[in-house]
Image (cartoon, helix red, strand yellow):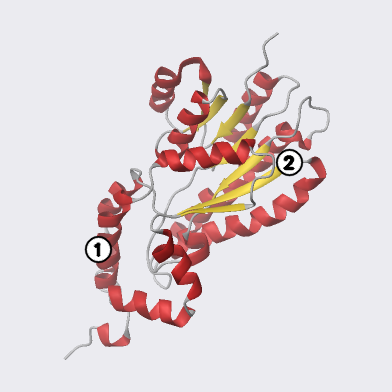
Amino acid sequence: MSKPSPTVVITGASTGIGHACATYLARMGWHVFAGIRKQADADRLTEELGAAVTPLVMDVTDAAGMTAAAEQVGKALGENTLGGLVNNAGIAVSGPMTDIPIDEFEWQMAVNVTGVVRTTQLFAPFLGRDSNRIGKPGRIVMMSSMAGEMGAPFLGPYSASKHAVEGLTKSLRRELMLFGIQVVVLGPGAVATPIWAKAEEVDPSAYEHTPYYKPLMAIRDYMTRNGPAGLAPDVIAKRVHKSLTQSRPRFRYALVPQRFSNWTLPKLLPARMVDNIVARRIGLRPEDLDTPE
């Protein structure tokens, strides 16, 4: 009798990193339960990956829909354990922290933090939290970001959400040792995905009459220009696969393009020096402030 395929749930699988993970893991022999929000994306994934994928139409902020998706996976697994959960779904909300509407900040946290906790709670029993399941414990891969460690001007909501993911991952990792479930966090830098095209669509006009308008435009132009030159999504997908399969994966992987200048050097330099460099580049020094004549 042939050995059954390992199984994995991936949230946010319609595009970008999530789609790359679904494609790569399917190619490596996994059966992928792919979380997407639109039926059109479900149809496209089925056409692309065939029987290797089961689309799950779900939204991590919708408690009832997530519960239904978990029940669907539970029925498909029978008594067996789930091999992996990749918490990838996320959004990026931008704006100056002193001015951003609170409802936008709350939406950022609802998707990137509460959504991760909700997803983990629903699928943890299948990973081995329920000791009655048959098979070795599964693993969880948390998709964080370089921003979760480094921060960036006008990405405070996103950075806060990913910093929260970093912290809750450490707690979760230690708690799930009781069940043999390993938890790995990935912290990518810029990845060449459609999210960078969306940067051009961000409308900063709400802040046009604040001192932040010019720096906002500068950082938006920087992201639009440099984002598409980031890592290929397949690089992240391959690390996800290794995180799910290596006997002793590291607790955290920083996957950053131009690693020395973007990651190593800023961590070695004094924080005040790094702040001054960033402020000078995009116009956040007191002398850059427009004052009435």
Q: Which amino acid type is marked by label 2? A: Ile
Cα gap from disc 2 to disc 1, whole angstroms: 46 Å
Q: Can residue 256 be seen from the camera position used here?
A: yes
What residue would you read off at disc 2? 181
Q: Position of residue 242 (x, y in %)?
A: 58, 39
Does residue 166 appear left or right of residue 3 in this picture? left
Q: Nearer the viewer, mark 2 or mark 1?
A: 2
The single residue placed furthest to the bottom in the displayed view is: 293
Which residue is depicted at the point 66% across and 31% down? 83
Q: Position of residue 148 (x, y in %)?
A: 51, 60
| Residue 206 rendering spot, x and y as whole percentages | 29, 64
> On the picture, is 105 further left or further right than 195?
right
Q: Is residue 102 visible?
A: no
Establish if 190 lies above or below 285.
above
Q: Which residue is mark 1?
A: 205
Q: Residue at x 38, y 23 (%)?
A: 44
Mark 2, secondary structure of its residue: loop
For the residue carrying disc 2, how many other residues have a C-alpha within 10 Å: few (<14), some (14-19), or many (20+)?
many
Relative depth, front residue between 189 and 35? 189
Q: Are marks 2 and 1 in contact (CB under 8 Å)?
A: no
User: As displayed, is residue 212 above or below residue 22?
Assistant: below
Question: How many C-alpha atoms fall within 10 Å of the one at disc 1: few (<14), some, or many (≥20)?
Answer: few
**Is residue 181 shown above or below 25?**
below
The disc labelled 1 sits on which kind of residue?
A: Ser
Residue under the point 67% across and 35% down: 123
> In the rendered image, which quarter is residue 272 located in?
bottom left
Name the side, left or right, on which 41 lies relative to 61. left
**Which disc, if any, is residue 34?**
none
Lateral position of residue 223 relative to residue 142, left or right: left
Q: How many numbered marks does the figure carry?
A: 2
User: Furthest-top residue in view?
Assistant: 1
